[in-house]
Image (cartoon, rainbow, N blue to C red):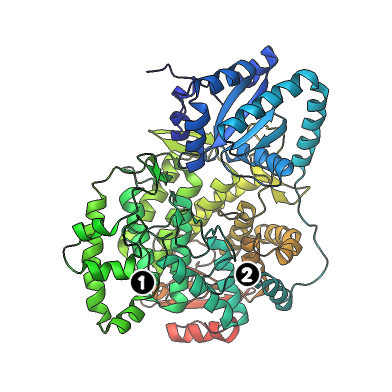
Amino acid sequence: MPLPNHLIRELSPYLLQHAYNPVDWYPWGEAASAKAAAEGKLLLISIGYASCHWCHVMERESFEDEAIARFMNENFVCIKVDREERPDIDQVYMSAVQMIQGRGGWPLHAFALADGRPFFGGTYYPPDQWRQLLQQIVAVSTNKPLELEKQAEEIAAGVRVNVFAEAVARDLDLAAIDNSITSWSRAFDHNWGGQSGAPKFPVPVNFLYLLRYYKASGKKEILDFVILSLQKMGRGGIYDQLGGGFARYSTDAEWKIPHFEKMLYDNAQLVSLYTEAFQLSRLEEFRNVVYETIAFVERELTSPEACFYSALDADSEGEEGLFYTWTAAEIFANVKEDAALFCDYYFNQAEARDVLFVKLGLAEYAQIKGLDPAVLEAKFAIARGQLLAARGGRIRPALDDKSLCSWNALMSKACFEAYEVFGEKKFLQLGKANLDFLMEKCRRNDGGLWHRYKAGIAGIPGFLEDYAFLMEALLAFPAGIDNRYLYQAKTLMHISLDQFYDVEQGLCFFTAAEDEKLFARKMELIDNVIPSSNASVCRSLFRLGLIFHEDSFLKTAKSMLGLMQEKTLQHPASFSNWGIALLENLMPFYTIAIAGPEAETIKHALNQHYLPFSLKVASTVDCFLPLLQNRHEADKTVIHVCHENGCLLPTENVAEALVLLGETVGKG
């Protein structure tokens, strides 16, 4: 076996995948940059993640090639970075590559001076192109070193700029949002849902914004589009029809052919999305997606310590999707009865391997076949169980078993939201066990957060996303008799503002003031598949301000939102989390304080209705929480509906409370 390189002592599964490459990889750190400076070499920074298919391809083609590795070792100091462990490093070099190439992706490669400033970069390169590029970089560095210095400084200066709009002195109204959504809707695919074209990424925060816009505007065509999109996704190959859970994206326009890696952050947000969509639609297929996806996470991505693992690889046995695809012969061999019916519904290939997906809803299909839908579903459930058991005997995709605070928080929040709507105790238990794990294992001695946990070791100082999403999870906990999580959220907000908020720019940096200084310090303002952490902080400031009567929180939230208003209206698909905050600020927003022995029952009843422009806090016992203080009565449960520092007449009746809310929030 070859000798390991410098990655062998790392915890990241991605870095450990490369620990026996002949490339003399270093982890990010002082040792690599000091070596480059001492030996007069350039840095070659390669960034990816454990479940990245093209990262595996480039490793096999180039980084395991002895001749290519030798040339890299002789001419560069080579650094491997796990983008999920170090999203701050990924941000700055991704920005640089996007400036250079006009696009980005993974694996990401940046060539930089010894101080880390990049002068060139790209993504995946086939081996012949990679060899040629390496040779060209060496030639330029030898013959034109001053050119590299100039280019590196120009790129670094460009990356350092945090682009956002300044506040515009005009009042926001729903008509401005109408125009914004109308412009965005021209890119909608009204046949298959989502954005037109391919590949297609499910971006949950886009749909969450559209659901809230429907609630505000009453435009049913928006709701219809979201429901269509979620139906097509849930029936497509991007969704695991046997085991639940979503793949990262679809390579085609019809959600059929997935890129098979399964990420925790996708599935967490999609649980939240389908839960909200169920509140509006009451569609059983949305309920099923929630239950099956949580079951997948619990079965395949949950550790004995109650933390959630990061991802499952796309590949197994060196082939993408092999674990998830079938031939008709395999289906007939494993389904004991009704195999032909199963294939007709879920499978469309006679001989070739294919993923399972459906084209029609169960009720429509049952009507065509003249069968009872309940009987049909019972048959299919047995067949799915038989195929899932058979699939369990296959070689599994690799597991990325690190746990990230931010992604875990997204999942625990999703569990709480699903519990609030469906009342399923195991959802609450799963989320609470994880939340308690995060608060115990990912808290530093100074009260701050660690970003990563693996093998009993927490490390890497937390980024803004860790604080932002953990605060969301703490705020989402169904308090009942335990409001300590709300106080913990408030404490984390104070730390966040102290460490990340920039008074001059009025927004938050992604890295803390006391953490490692890269050549640029970025602000994460745009939604990607993971929503903007700045927008998340803004929305939590708003909620905490209402719960604790903290005017400073409300003022800061309004200021942040003002800075982002015009960008959000111009580019709603890229700023949907800010769009949600805009609507929460524009629409009448209600606090609903529920106090008394039946507080949890009443809150659950209210949660059967879609009330996005409200904040519900419940307690079965008297407490000092400002929103609930002096409102507890031992012999009855009272609902207090409040708005703009005033409360309507309290009621003990859920229907009456809904009427109060319906008069201003609207129907839906």
- Among the 4 quarters of the image, the one containing residue 369: bottom left
Of residues 168 and 44, the one drawn nearer to the viewer in this rendering: 44
Residue 425 visible? yes
Coordinates of residue 561 in the picture (x, y in percent): 70, 61
**What amino acid type is highlighted by mark number 2?**
Glu
Image disc number at residue 214: none
Coordinates of residue 56 in the picture (x, y in percent): 47, 37
Report the side of 417 relative to 346 (left or right).
right
9 lies above or below 191: above
Residue positioned 44% across, 54% down in the render: 411
**What amino acid type is highlighted by mark number 1?**
Pro
Of residues 523 and 649, the one drawn nearer to the viewer in this rendering: 523
Report the side of 292 relative to 403 (left or right).
left
The mark nearer the N terminus, 1 or 2, is: 2
- Residue at the top extreme of this rendering: 38
Residue positioned 56% across, 82% down in the render: 220
Coordinates of residue 558 in the picture (x, y in percent): 71, 62
Look at mark 2 in the image and give the residue it sits on.
584
Q: What is the CA distance from the residue labelled 1 to the residue labelled 2?
A: 30 Å
Coordinates of residue 29 in the picture (x, y in percent): 59, 25
Residue positioned 25% across, 49% down in the render: 392
Look at mark 1 in the image and give the residue it sits on.
597
Of residues 283 and 475, the one drawn nearer to the viewer in this rendering: 283
- Residue at the front extreme of this rendering: 351
The N terminus: image quadrant = top left
Secondary structure under the numbered disc 1 in the rendered image: loop
